[in-house]
Amino acid sequence: MNAIRADGSASQISVLRADSLREKVIRALEAAIVAGELQPGVIYSAPALAERFGVSATPVREAMLDLVSEGFVEPLRNRGFRVIELSDEDLDNIAQIRMLIEVPIMSQIAPRLTAAAFEKLTVAAEAIERAAADGDVLEYLDADRRFHVALISAIGNPRLTDLVDRLRRQARLFGLMDLAKSGRLMASARDHRKLLDMIRAGDTQAAENLMRAHISHTRGLWAGRQDRD
């Protein structure tokens, strides 16, 4: 299972870093959704997907049930699973919740980040920019997730980290390929380094403003349009 780039080509760089087969299948399914290979509204059976990925039906079925719990797909009795299509209202709701959580929390994160945490975040931010430059949407998705999970984890609330991670993934699995093809992925990528610089400088107000703008901007981009403000 290969990395998928914005031009539709595949590289031999593995994007499946999880240890278990179930986790690998989840990553492969997410990759297929990002690449548009699994279309919203279309029904897919576990056996058919298993044959496609070269594994048994059991880990595929388990992986799909995990994606059901995360709101990516829905089960259809005796038929299979259908990828859920996010409406504009869904995307608006996700953006609203993210605004309520991720913006004000900047002031709490800043004083809790250690030197080691900053180093980890810097590495992730650099990986995000490299992926954007290469047009590698799956690596971008992976690095972006590492960055924001590490950032929110500084609060020390696993439930909060899981909630933010889930909301961000729900929005980003859809429309990311079009964003990369449009050439606008790098602008979003650079926000991560800017955010770190603001936090490191102790300017939490600027960090909050950037996070607010970042969420608003990406909300418009995920829907294939610019901000409506």
Image: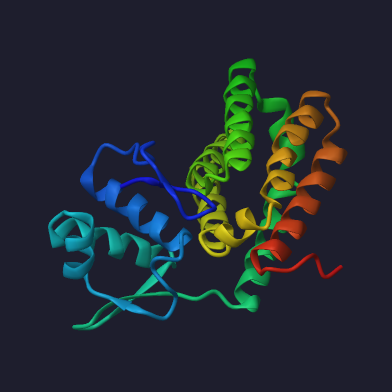
Give the left or right position of residue 123, taking residue 14 as reference: right
State the residue in front, 8 or 26.
8
Name the spot of residue 176 as percent of width and height, x first.
Answer: 57, 58
Identified at 14% across, 60% down, the residue is: 58
Identified at 69% across, 44% down, the residue is: 186
**Is residue 139 placed above or below 82 in the rendered structure?**
above
**Is residue 156 placed above or below 118 in the rendered structure?**
below
State the residue in front, 91 or 52.
52
Identified at 40% across, 57% down, the residue is: 30
Give the left or right position of residue 14, taking residue 160 as reference: left
Name the spot of residue 71 as percent of width and height, x first.
Answer: 44, 67
Determine which quarter of the picture holds residue 93.
bottom right
Residue 171 visible in the snapshot: yes
Identified at 66% across, 62% down, the residue is: 97
Q: Pick the quarter of the image with the C terminus.
A: bottom right
Residue 155 visible in the snapshot: no
State the residue in front, 71 or 135.
135
Q: How is the image coloured?
A: rainbow
Name the spot of residue 174 as percent of width and height, x first.
Answer: 54, 64
Name the spot of residue 100 as percent of width and height, x first.
Answer: 72, 57
Q: Residue furthest top?
A: 115
Count of numbered tags: 0
Determine which quarter of the picture holds residue 2.
top left
